[in-house]
Amino acid sequence: MRKVFYILLLMPCGLRAQNYSTALIPDSLKKDARGVIRDQEMIMEIKSPGKAVWRERHVYTVLNSNADYLANYRSHYDKLLSISDISGVLYDSLGKAVRKAKRKDMQDRTMDDGMSLATDDRELEHNFYCQLYPYTVDYQENDEEDGILGFHTWMPLVGSGISTQHSKYVIIAPKDYLVRYLSVNGAPAPVITEEKDKKIYTWEAWNMPARKTESHGPIWTEIVPYVMTAPSDFEQQGYKGNMSTWTDYGKFIQQLRTGRDLLPENIKQQVHALVDTIPDVHRKVYALYRYLQQNTHYISVQFGIGGWQPFPADYVANKRYGDCKALSNYMVALLKEAGIKGKYVEIMAEKDAPPMIDKFSCSQFNHAISCVPLDKDTIWLECTNQTVSPGYMGTFTGGREAILIDEDGGHLVRTPGYTAADNIQCRVVQAQLAPDGDLDAAVRTRYGCIRQELPHAMIDVWSAEDRKKYLNELFDLPTYTVDKSHYDEYKGPHPVVDEDLHVTVSNYASVSGKRLFINPNVFDRNSLRLPADSIRKYDYVDDNAFTNIDSVVITVPSGYEVEARPKDVAIQGDFGTFRTSLRFENDKLIYYRFRQHSAGRYPPAEYAALVKFYEQLYQSDNQRVVLVKKE
Amino acid sequence: MINRKSIAALAVLCLCLSVLHPFAQGLGKAKHMLGKLTAADFTLPATTIVDSNTNAVTLADLGDVHFIGDKRGWFSYVYVRQTRIKILNKKAFDLATVKVDLYGESDEDRDKLSNVTASAWNLENGQLQETKLEPKDVYTSKTNKRWTEAKFSVPGVKEGSILEYTYTIVSQYNFDLPSWKFQSERYPCLSSEYHVEIPTTLNYVLVRQGVHPYAVDKGSTGNGTYFVTEKADGASMGAPDHDYTVSAITVKHDWVMKNIPAFGTEHYLTTPDNYIDEISFQLSSTYNGVESTAHMNTWAKATEELLTGSQFGGALNDDDEAITGLADKIPEGSSSTATAKAVYYYVSQHFTCIGHDKYVRTNLRDVIRNNSGTVGEINLLLTGLLRKKGLAADPVLLSTREHGFNLASYPMLEKLNYVIVRLHLGDKVYYLDAARPDLGFGTLAPDCYNGHARIISKTDSGSVYFWADSLKERKVTMVLMSGTDKGLTGTWQSSPGMLESYNVRRKIAEHGQDQFFKDIQTSWGDDAEISDGGIDSVDRLEEPVKIHYDFLLKQQPGAPVLYFYPIMGDEWHTNPFMAAERKYPVEMYYTIDQTYIFSLMIPDGYVVDELPKSAKVAFNGDQGYFEYLIVNQGGQIQLRCRVRLNKAWFGAEDYSTLRDFFGFIVKKENEQIVLKKQ
């Protein structure tokens, strides 16, 4: 009897009769919408810390072709997560079921990202390819998971221009199991009920109108409500842990690493030969890091717990390769052999990664690095890159929170960020203009920190052929050739690249009967113009911090005087500093430009001023000086 | 410099056959043909193909194909690959990861990968050190239903390492033999060899392309003995399999190429595959001891097989009922043209193309049911539907540009990857492609313009050619301005070519017309204010769109001197041919014909102080021209500017002329008019 009741309670949602006629969508949900989440249910039942089952249903109405992507159903599985049942139905606009799909109708493919040597990540994919709008798709699936290292995030509004009629997330757990959750951006608290020996957490939302992202606006997770959920106790492939605090989370990761830092004898000897005679600890770390860079490279192999656990140090020593976890773990082992305490750090990498939610301990990471905390500073090491500077984090991992894994558990740390003064591009141009308008320019540029990432890649990652091709397409110049290029690199926590180019430009200046039209700003023109009539709801976000300095001297043929010229500009305000000055003396155009911008966010009220600011830049950068022959 | 004419030479390996006495044979392990590595191999020989920019050098690349008897009563090929590469620096580490594609749906039928060995060799203090690949580090994963990928990464690689690997594939899919690329896109190669030994029961044609000479190119004959097992037929349950031995004369061929430079690709080059040194094979006939069977070894034969095979023409007969059912849903038009268009647009707007396969994967019923299919499926369905309406439609096989050239002289099916439809309406011929939803009736996408294509028809098969030189992208832009009391105002209107129209349509479908004009306004910034924007012919896919709007230039009122660019928003701002030099031909997608017409009523109170000079230059005689004609007549400035290229493909020797030609265009189109206040 009890069993029957239980089955009814958890009846697969598909058995319920529902009408998905699009006529039933309220107008408020059609406004600004290309698609509607009609019904979304995710029910997770935690059987034990090592086992969970999922029942999901996703019913989406596609209002026009811009939401077709919603109807492309994809479901991930791997060695620990299996899909026990999956099916789909297509409804026409009247809500009549017109086609059905079973598992055998779906594409089954590897989710190899092209970067991995091997992965167990696979997906089922299906699409009805309906082109009669509006239409509705309804997919249901049941999954079984071994080990519960991560739960879903419930986010009822899934994307720009998609409204939600109903969305529900349920977690059913044993009564004594602590389910952890965090409501963000005003998401509702769960309704918690109890059934026998189960505790049921339910989050539910109805009739949420579509929202739209804005260009240069905040990321989606900043503007919509969502709930993060995570396990307390968990088990996977024989490992047990708890992630209720960062300390506990760190203990689990530390457990996975235990005994994996043993180096082969020959490597130990090499470590000692390398660093024992170096007195300074910074230089020891740099030497070991260089050793790592010279002897290993990145290859990823991911299976099951392998997504969490590094391969042992001797694996890397032997194969000379590993993924971020294996290489970072290996670096820490090398440091340990040299008597230096290195630490293993988990982090969310990528330039535009969402910020870590530090008050909710769960895996929010996709990468591992290592670091060496010292008395006065900490040396940060990216271990998957064979050429990056020691201590430099850059756009990939810089300026964000991460979890340092220590013997006593996890600790919240922050990687170094880079300011406008660090990210410098300082350029000196000495140029000669021929009577027919051709320009011959010697260009020296110093790039710092984030600004050196591209020239760094050009030197150390690209082939010489690709570099040449790139340099000859880089500049916004009529017809030009870079016939000489030379680079010097200075490594360190604030890396610098010096670039020396020789550039010849055909017809750089327009020469008419008596006039000469020339733009004194040869290499650094701002081409961004912002839409003036946009009505913004959210902040304008510009995370780039940089300083650009240009000093240009162009010697022009003699006998000219200035007829018209762009005005000198001096703007200092919320959007940074922009200054230009131009002089013409002794047949020389002497131009100076300074632009500095710090990372910033500008509320909608300031947007009009921002549009104007960029327009001023555009005008200043793109105007030509008109020289006219002296009478 | 490489000329497009020198791409392909067709050769047929000529064979004879005899059945000899039985003899035992085994799979046999591949002999180590590369020889043992020594410390001397770490020193690269002095050669012009290696310079300071080289990141890795293939020391030796060796392929061998021979045959064995198999359990299907026939012959499988055995392909052995051995490669030795010197890694000079980190930029070439990706060479250590090797991928091998294996064909076949079931475990039993799939190509078998075996004998995988790989090592990295490092020279440490004069001593050779080897790090070996462990067998468990070879990973396989099913890519899709038909293909499986095996991958491994050679362990122990660092700068200066020599890496070496070998593997064997046994395959029953012997219609094509593995093709062999002597030249690599990115790395030079000291020695590349390919050896084949084929029993005379099988005949292959081979296609050779490329420009580098062979050091060895030698044919010979030998003897082979093949142990073949024929499965007992299903009728006599329990009957034993039938084993027999075939001895056959074999045809052997050895090709060796030395010191092959890296290809090094360039812009405006569709695919290096058209030019690199390569040999590919296709089965032409088989002999079973009694009679010889031809396999698509002429276009006539291929056409016959394609017309009946269930993966192409036969699919139309197999699903006649389903196609009739669908055809009945599409109303007929008032004329045969209207009916053809109705069918075409029905297919292009109801079916989603999900891949560039020329064949039908299962059947056309599935395509109709799933609303989706490959290019081949969608356009065969279109063929079938048009025929149901009594129209003369036939499929046409071709190769898209990215897939490389194909041969008119011989049906190499691997070289064909796309299907379109030829339709006869009265005495007019249309070529249709319903696999791309935004194309108009009778229009093909530019990547179909790749030379030879073959009509597959019961009545009039034959070759037809689509050249980029024949695809014209014609654009006319007109700007009329005059001075008013508000300032300089004007109208801007432009009819771009079909391809640009296609892009405009996509943009409007995605973001809407309002956004389209907002973007134009944003691009003008404070320089102008635009109004009354409109686009004509958005829904008439067979015609180019027409974009028009009014604008007001926000110049300083009453300025003593007015400067402005007469060519607005449509100029060549930078030279499209950026690189200073060129090795390979320039392959553009279409010919260009751009006309820009401008007129300005000079505002009251101003006179012309300076006008750009008129100019006209021809490109390579009659291959194109640039014209810039400007006059000031009765208070009106009139400009007519035209860029015209009559060809889309140019030899490398034309490159600098082409670059100079565009250099001149960029210069002229960025000149300014100067008006002065009286």
Image (tube, coloured by chain):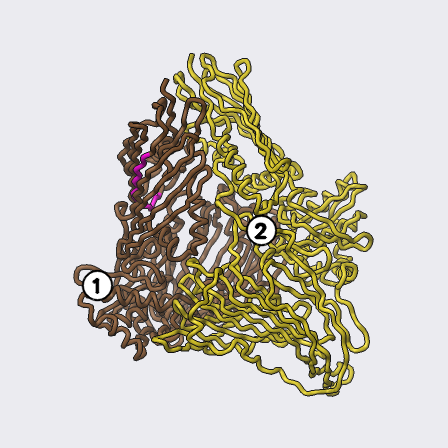
Letter of the chain shown yellow in the rendering: B
Which residues lie in the magenta part?
A541-553
Circle 2 marks a residue in which chain? Answer: B
Q: Is residue A243 left or right of residue B383?
A: left
Q: Position of residue A490 (x, y in %)?
A: 28, 54
Q: Residues within 10 Å of mark 2 (few under 14, many from 20)?
A: many
Circle 1 marks a residue in which chain? Answer: A
- Chain A, hue in figure: brown
Q: CA distance from mark 2 to mark 1?
A: 51 Å
Residue at 59% over, 68% down: B256
Q: Which residue is mark 2?
A: B270
Q: Which residue is mark 1?
A: A282
Would residue A50 be seen by someone viewing this image from the given angle? no
Q: Choose mark 2 or mark 1, whichever is in front.
A: 2
Q: Position of residue B419 (x, y in %)?
A: 69, 53
Q: Are marks 2 and 1 on the same chain?
A: no
Q: Nearer the viewer, residue B86 or B294?
A: B86
Would residue A267 be seen by someone viewing this image from the given angle? yes
